[in-house]
């Protein structure tokens, strides 16, 4: 499990952060998870939100990165453009 500033990430949390990275998301930009993907990552999304790395938006399945989440995303997946 990768560790970022004393934080360890599960495979599911890494996958969520990778999804944000693949869509080139910046802090505050909303990304929607839906269908099977939302169900698959529900616990990871909740955990990242509780740790202050994501913000749950009002729209169903929508989340955005905090500045800390953006930093974590870039450190966990530095090789993605």
Image (spheres, rainbow, N blue to C red):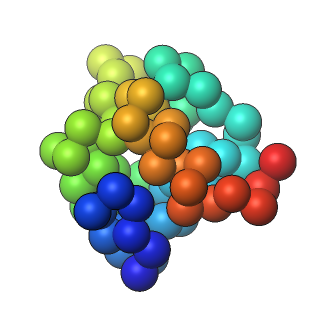
* Vertical order, 1 against 3 (above or below): below
Q: How many marks?
A: 0
Q: Nearer the viewer, residue 50 or 45?
A: 50
Res 39 → quadrant: bottom left
Residue 44: x, y in percent?
32, 60
What residue is drawn where x is 30% and y is 30%?
A: 56
- For the question of whether residue 35 can be seen, the reply is no
Residue 64: x, y in percent?
44, 29
Q: Residue furthest bottom?
A: 1
Residue 8: x, y in percent?
31, 70
- For the question of whether residue 1 can be seen, the reply is yes
- Position of residue 59 in the picture relative to residue 77 (left or right): left
* Vertical order, 52 against 5 (above or below): above
What residue is drawn where x is 23% and y is 55%?
A: 47
Question: Where is the N terminus found, in terms of image quarters?
Answer: bottom left
* Vertical order, 15 against 74 (above or below): below
Res 53 → quadrant: top left
- Position of residue 81 in the picture relative to residue 67 (left or right): right
Q: Nearer the viewer, residue 50 or 35?
A: 50
- Position of residue 8 in the picture relative to residue 12 (left or right): left
- Position of residue 29 in the picture relative to residue 54 (left or right): right
Residue 66: x, y in percent?
39, 29
What residue is drawn where x is 64% and y is 32%?
A: 25
């Amino acid at each position: 499990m990768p560790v970022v500033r004393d934080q360890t990430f599960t495979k599911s949390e890494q996958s969520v952060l990778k999804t944000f990275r693949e869509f080139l998301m910046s802090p505050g930009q909303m990304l929607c998870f839906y269908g099977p993907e939302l169900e698959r990552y529900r616990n990871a999304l909740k955990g990242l939100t509780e740790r202050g790395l994501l913000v749950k938006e009002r729209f169903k399945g929508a989340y955005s990165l905090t500045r800390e989440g953006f930093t974590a995303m870039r450190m966990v997946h530095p090789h993605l453009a």
